[in-house]
Image (cartoon, rainbow, N blue to C red):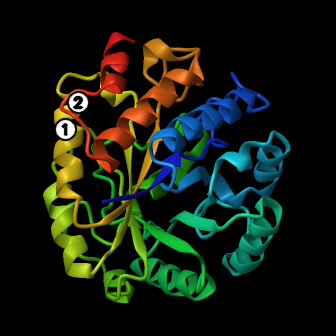
Amino acid sequence: MVDSIVLWNEPNNLSHWNFHLDPDWRIYAETVRCASEAIREIAPDLPVVLGGVSSCDVDFLRLMKSYGTLQHVDAVGVHGFPLDWNHWRIEEWPQRLLEAGEVSELPVWVTEVGASTFGAEEIGTFGLKRTLQLLHGAARVYWYSLFDLPPSWPAETRHKEAEGSAYYRHYYLGLLRHDGSPKPMLEAFPADGSIGICQWFHFEDPRLENAVHWMHRLGVRHLRTGLSWADFYRPNAVAWFDRMMEALAPFEVAVTLCFTPGHLGLEEHHTSPPRDPRQFAEFAAWAVERYCLASPEKSPVEEALARA
């Protein structure tokens, strides 16, 4: 069911990791090291992936390499949205992937790539077709996303005002509209299982069953989603995690672990670096024990998390 663990999401994006509190990303590097060691202690063959780097930022990969962080992962994740947010052209994808591989000396997974239909439906169709041509041969590609974000939900960003109208592109990145109806670009999505889907599920997300239906219909094999460390402390969190992971059992799932519980961060916000990276490592070990290995009803790792 779980074929890999991705450590954090876009750590070079302020909306996911508050680098004002960690300006040289040393806490992030330590967080990756601790979590990777904890995972490898109990599941040494499970691939560990560096959290997808926003805008395929190779300078960030160079920084992580200088800290020795890349020694603790098996692949690096990169993200790119050149038709919507990034300051480079879509045709640059092959060169950027090549550079990321040369710098990291690791396989490069495109853990998020997409094109919004904010301006026109045709842009989404073009973006999907052209992107897949340019990324042909990449180790792993996850299209973001299956569903548009519902208009009543907030997009995950700390700087909505600064984004202006670009903020609303967050809402139009699905193959399906928020009401579940298909967009024209859906017809261009490969039905052979070669391309994965990246779909985040909110806590107790009502779209879960419909997502499973559509992924089966589209022939999807690979899925990237997340388990929120912050959500772990909500009432009924484990029941929701269990329900979600059971529903996703037919797919090969790359599980992204991220978001800091407010009471464990340097500030009370889910994008905060943790005060103690070892606590994130405990959560990572719990997730791997529960969803990658046969584990008891309540493991020692879960008891330690409960005490924390």
- The residue lying at 34 percent from left, 10 percent from top is 307
Q: Is residue 59 visible?
A: yes
Specify the quadrant that holds the C terminus.
Answer: top left
- The residue lying at 22 percent from left, 60 percent from top is 249
Q: Which residue is mark 1?
A: 240
- Vertical placement of 263 versus 136: above or below? above
Q: Which mark is residue 24?
A: none
88 or 101: nearer the viewer: 101
- The residue lying at 36 percent from left, 82 percent from top is 193
Are dots 2 and 1 in contact, CB under 8 Å?
Answer: yes
SS at circle 2: helix
Q: Residues within 10 Å of mark 2 (few under 14, many from 20)?
A: some
Residue 96 located left or right of residue 84: right
- The residue lying at 50 percent from left, 28 percent from top is 280
Q: Which residue is mark 2?
A: 237
Identified by mark 1, the residue type is Trp
194 or 292: nearer the viewer: 292
Q: Is residue 159 visible?
A: no
Residue 296 percent coordinates (x, y):
21, 34
Real-space Cα separation, disc 2 to disc 1, in angstroms = 5 Å
Residue 26 percent coordinates (x, y):
75, 29
Identified by mark 2, the residue type is Ala
The image quarter containing residue 236 is top left
Residue 96 located left or right of residue 129: right
